Image: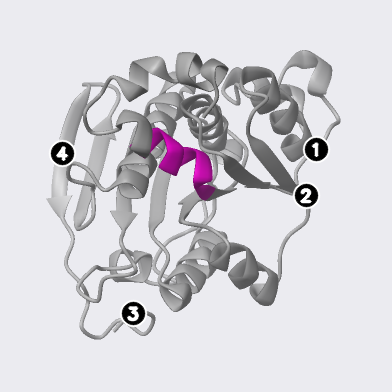
Amino acid sequence: MNDEQLLRYSRQIMLPEIDVIGQQKLLDSHVLIIGMGGLGSPVAMYLASAGIGNLTLVDDDKVELSNLQRQIAHTQNDIGKYKTDSAKETLLSLNPDINVTTINHRMNENELINEIQKSDVVIDATDNFTTRFSINKACVKTGTPLVSGAAIRMEAQITVFNNDKKDSPCYHCLYKEGDELDESCTETGVLAPLVGIIGSIQALETIKILLGFGETLTGKLLLLDAKTMEWRSIKLGKDPACPVCA
């Protein structure tokens, strides 16, 4: 690291869990963020600021006026742009040292697996179950850690699937295909700061995975009720009959 980087990341380097060695590891890391909306925006911004050296952003949507209430990586001037392009501009304005790659189309299975294989951690910041199941299958197949978050109305959840360990549950252990209706904030609404809270935790869990300190949310589902500001933690076990990870 050069002197400017040492100054930029000085508050993190001071932490014994990170230090210079850990910061360099972050700079050398590659994180794939799928979804650049309400969750993906704070995730990407915090990871860029923290010095994750290589970020790949995936989203095929363009910025709309209704996005700006919660998708903080985009501004009024970005309406009509691809979200990935808008977010890239924001991230590089925060930290020009990092590398940001954008994918603004829906990937097929082979493309998804190829991108995941390049990554140290995958972040699911999407808003529909069909995509989440596809991401989960690819992460299980490649043994890549997956940080999954979701928020709708005034409720949210977050967990980590440590797919490189045989005893870790996967997303399919939690939800079965066909059991859940696809709901998004387009139909049901969402409180703006809620996605910021969950996205920030996704970024934190990602850094913990990359550096190997503390305890992650592997095997635990963290639930938040924003009305009462109550958190609940539920243990997740591996489904021995899971068709994806068993």
The residue beneath circle 3 is: 245
Mark 1 or 2, nearer chain start: 1
Other residues around mark 1 within 10 Å, as few (<14) / some (14–19) / many (≥20): many
Rounded to the nearest whole Å, what is the CA distance between mark 4 and mark 1? Answer: 36 Å
Mark 4 or 1, nearer chain start: 1
The residue beneath circle 4 is: 232
In the image, residue 170 lies in the stretch drawn in magenta: no
Rounded to the nearest whole Å, what is the CA distance between mark 4 and mark 2? Answer: 35 Å
Assign the C terminus to one quadrant of the image. Answer: bottom left
Mark 3 or 1, nearer chain start: 1
Amino acid type, mark 3: Cys
Decide: is 237 above or below 148: below
Looking at the image, which residue sits at the far front? Answer: 2
Q: Position of residue 7 (x, y in %)?
A: 47, 13
Q: In this view of the protein, which residue sits in the foreground, 226 or 81?
A: 81
Rounded to the nearest whole Å, what is the CA distance between mark 3 and mark 4? Answer: 26 Å
The residue beneath circle 2 is: 104
User: Please, what secondary structure does the residue beneath circle 4 have?
Assistant: strand
User: Please, what secondary structure does the residue beneath circle 3 have?
Assistant: loop
Decide: is 163 above or below 147: below
Amino acid type, mark 2: Asn
Q: Which residues are magenta?
A: 22-30
Asked if disc 1 and disc 2 are in contact, CB closer than 8 Å, the reply is: yes
Residue at left 40%, top 45%? 149
Q: Position of residue 23 (x, y in %)?
A: 40, 34
Mark 3 or 4, nearer chain start: 4
